[in-house]
Image (cartoon, rainbow, N blue to C red):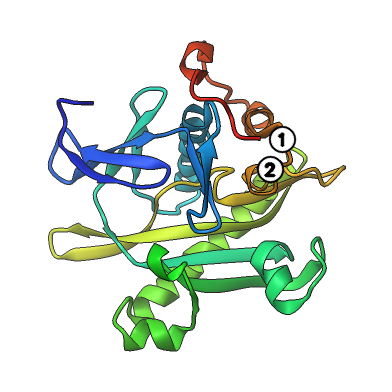
Amino acid sequence: MSRRRQIYEGKAKVLFEGPEPGTLITYFKDDASAFNNQKKGTITGKGVLNNRISEYLMLRLGEVGVPTHFVRRLNMREQLVREVEIIPIELVVRNVAAGSLSKRLGIKEGTHLPRSIVEYYYKNDELQNPLVSEEHITAFGWATTQDLDDMMALALRVNDFLTGLFLGIGIRLIDFKLEFGRLYHDDDMQIVVADEISPDNCRLWDGKTNEKMDKDRFRQDLGNVEAAYQEVARRLGILPEDGQGDHKGSKTLQ
């Protein structure tokens, strides 16, 4: 990696210049954070598992016509993606009350919502990623009305597909976060799903026991964090190939 130019380092990933113009290489770290970076730690092997899980889900979405920035996985911790202009808005799709929604509105965690709810958050760690409205987004030029229409349509398609996919392996998709980017090609621009889809940004509960199988185990000090991520990968049929050596890292915060 030292021979590549680093473009950006975030809380869970590092971006490097890609082998061709218009591409980037994403490196998945084992670092973990929660509560807008107020809690930090390491989940051993998380980068390997999230790389595989996100690869699998992005490929499946591509098969049903959802455009993404994903190109291919390069190795256990890296994948090649198309360079996009990230829209500074996160969409959170909620199917069941949990997390901040339960706290803000006093709805008991686990309550099935009457319909899927989509919320917008402004991507700004210094401001703790505040909840915003469509009026804020369009007034401040973070995205256009057409951008939001495209993002909303894609988010609902992703939710419909992933809900069924996870249901088929005994997992409930409680909620998840999506990021989007503008992909430019000649004179055309397309909104595509970007970043990753993994237990880092999805709430996943066991279909029978409601046991949490995502980063909430880290947030809430529930323990067995690595095991939960591994179980998601196992049910998807994508445990890393001979990857135990690459799972070594700092002591897992449990």
Residue 128 in percent (x, y) is at 47, 67
Q: Residue at x 61, y 30 (%)?
A: 233
Q: Quadrant of residue 28?
A: top left
Label 2 environment density (alpha carbons within 10 Å; few <14, some 14–19, many ≥20): some
Q: Is residue 235 above or below residue 222?
A: above
Residue 215 in percent (x, y) is at 62, 45
Quarter in which the N terminus is drawn: top left
The reply, left or right, for residue 26 in relation to residue 49 is left
Q: Which is nearer the eye, 239 or 56? A: 239
Determine if residue 26 is in view. yes
Q: Residue at x 35, y 30 (%)?
A: 78
**Helix, strand, or loop for circle 2?**
helix
Residue 69 in percent (x, y) is at 34, 48
All told, the count of numbered labels is 2
| Extreme residue in the right direction | 208
Q: Residue at x 46, y 17 (%)?
A: 246
Residue holding disc 2: 217
Label 1 environment density (alpha carbons within 10 Å; few <14, some 14–19, many ≥20): some
**Helix, strand, or loop for circle 1?**
loop
Residue 223 tag number: 1
Q: Amino acid at mark 2?
A: Arg
The reply, left or right, for residue 67 in relation to residue 159 is left
The reply, left or right, for residue 222 in relation to residue 27 is right
CB under 8 Å between callouts 2 and 1?
yes
Q: Residue at x 52, y 32 (%)?
A: 46
Q: Amino acid at mark 1?
A: Gly
